[in-house]
Amino acid sequence: VKHTIVALVQDHPGVLHRVVSLFRRRGYNIESLTVGRSETPDVSRMTIVVDADVEQVTKQLNRLVEVLKVQDVTQDRTVERETVLVKVHAPATNRAGLIALTGARGAKVVDVGATSLVFELTDPPEAVESFIDLLRPLGIKEMIRSGRIAMVRGTQPATPSRPERPRAEPMAPPPTSWAAQADGQGD
Amino acid sequence: MCEARTGAQIMCEALLREGVAVMFGVPGGAIMPFYYAMYEYRDRLHHVLCRHEQGAGHAAEGYARATGRSGVCVATSGPGATNLVTPIADAWMDSTPLVAITGQVSSLVLGKDAFQETDITGITVPITKHNYLVKHVAELPRVFREAFHLATTGRPGPVLIDVTKDAQQAKTVPDWDVTLQLPGYKPTYDGHARQIRAAVQLLGEAERPLIMAGNGVIQSGAAGELLAFAERTGIPVITTLHGLGAFPEDHPLSIGMPGMHGWVHVNRAIQECDVLCNIGGRFDDRVTGNAAKFAPRATVIHVDIDPSEIGKNVRVAVPIVGDARRVLLAMLEQMPPRTATAWLAHIRAMEAKYQGRHKELTRPDTASLMPHDVYAALNRAFAARPAHRVVTDVGQHQMWAAQLIDWRRPRTHITSGGAGTMGFAIPAALGVAMAYPDDTVWAIVGDGGFQMTNQELATIVQESRRNVKVAVINNGYLGMVRQWQEMFEDKRYSGTLLSGPDFATLAGAYGVLGRTVERQEDVDAAIARAWDHAGPVVIDFRVEREVNVYPIVPQGKSLSEMLVGVGEDA
């Protein structure tokens, strides 16, 4: 199961190495990883999409001294975005149709070459995926995807709050999730 | 003192401020400024010159495990630093507080493949709790403070500080008013109140409860609390390899060691128990066997200071993140007295049926010395002379020591567990002997491990460690591998037949008293003589060569599938 994890890390040399080394040696498959500055000076924000036991990933990340906070936002209400740049084979004859087609998906033309166009699209990752599928038959010459970035949405008073995690009563069977208690952050 | 100091002087003063009195190392080019400064602190900061950096690292580990304080080892850049990798990995696996200080090439040439440049911070990322590359002298006071804090708090572990040569040489007025800059490091010490209540209730109502005590009990100094808790509840106690000494094995509630070479009745008890409370152990695969089939009837309570250990290998119903001692104290406050007499009697009956802990293995039809003769004699000597500590290496001799000696006190059984580092014992014994000059330190080691690091005998002599006594369990094989080859690989003894020098003669060359023992009747006298000899001793016990460690859970099998002899199911 894929999980989207947001981690705040100290902006120190080597911190990316520590995170990547952890994922490599424990065999966690990274689908995408993006890093950039956050709102706080000297703190970077990572968005990691990983296909692994998310509880272990979160706990192992928390063991790193330079990791400040780790959140599995998979089940949260988030804004997720990804940017793609695609260079498409585009002789003058079919450019107009191509631009109209991509424009309908919200993509911008960011470079015009003799036989090619470069489009940019920033959208939810699923929309980016379908945009690429749309262009693939036309001949993609080059492509770069930024990887997913995610942010939890602000509190929305009208929205009912999420149901609480199931809680273990003392003699009850093992709870399915106890991450919150296990890290000492429970109630 | 507003005097400007060199980085190297600041490093020495930082060590003194951390209470360090002894460190183990080998000098070299990139760490020379530190050694230059060390000279002026030599009365307060004793440097032990080891013969190999691996020895320095294991010696620092031995010191740390015997005392609970952080061990310190020092090496130069490049090969000096890479030789520390094994002991650092060993300390990482066994949660040993260790600060490793390495010199690094000057920042002016860093990254240019300079002479003896190795990216040791990069190399040690996966095997340290944290590491530092210091290029600016002003950072040294804070980095040293943080390194010792990280190494010794929470779940202890190794921290490496790599200091460039120019940072050691540069001068500054040190600012000792340092604040830790570790916003992401917040160990949890107090267990969650609701989980503790749940654990107490489970343990109070269980019919077949077990306590499994691991390294965490020793590290947090919780042996007294564990004893009180066990006696309050009558719950039988298992001690893992690194838990040996956390609970006295001559206590009526002690049932022994679990796992691959644990006793049949202990593993059976695990498979039958209804509540298993693991305190400070990490459910290593050598303990659990096939984890999916481990303790199938048990509701598991797991107390560990590291949240990532909980639920990693075994499904846990009641997770308690915290310090073993604090959690035990909290549990003691709430725990009503109870007994588990019938359950304990059942376990004792299984013990009598399957294999008692002192059952001698069948002696082959020879007059040879059996390894068990040596352990029986050592056990008698240890019982008679309490001022001792024991260090073991890795392999058959280590498992026999764990099985056949009655461990009574914390920090008296020191071994390489998680990493399984052959060559650990001799240098680690040096470290223990530096920490406890009045205790007799026995290193029990196989002939394989002994030949990996016996050069540290020279260090032991140079440091006048008269209290180090070495018992080599010499069977002329890499015995544990040979055993597996015998049991599981059609006796293809590939790369396990091992020759060696005459160890008594070798000891003599080091200025160490060497003795060879080949007959059962000579064992007690040899041990007594070694103990009373005012100097280090090596006894070469030439034991029966093809003896196996039993019982054994074959790798990947469940704890229910034990063998107690060749093709002999329990």
Image (cartoon, rainbow, N blue to C red):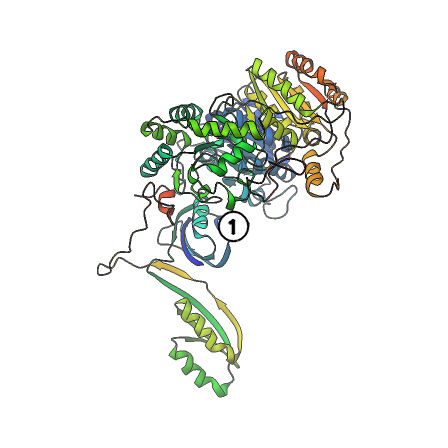
Give the camera-side residue of B353 and B126. B353
Where the N terminus of chain B falls, by quadrant?
top left
Give the camera-side residue of B377 and B392. B377
Residue sitting at x 63%, y 20%: B376
Give the camera-side residue of B449 and A135. B449
The residue that label 1 is drawn on is: A17
- Give x and y (percent) for residue B184: 40, 43
A168 lies above or below B205: below
Q: Is residue B218 in sight in this rendering?
A: no
Specify the amino acid type for callout 1. Answer: His
Q: How many marks?
A: 1
In terms of secondary structure, where does tag 1 sit?
helix
B224 lies above or below B96: above
- Give x and y (percent) for residue B147: 48, 35
Q: Residues within 10 Å of mark 1 (few under 14, many from 20)?
A: few
Q: Chain of mark 1?
A: A
Q: Is residue A152 in sight in this rendering?
A: yes
Where the C terminus of chain B falls, by quadrant?
top right
- Give x and y (percent) for residue A28: 51, 53
Residue sitting at x 35%, y 46%: A180
| Residue B382 in which image quadrant | top right
Q: Residue furthest bottom?
A: A93
Give the camera-side residue of A24 and A91. A24
Q: Residue furthest left?
A: A158
- Give x and y (percent) for residue B95: 51, 35
A36 lies above or below A174: below
Q: Please give left or right for residue B419 compared with residue B517 in the image.
A: left
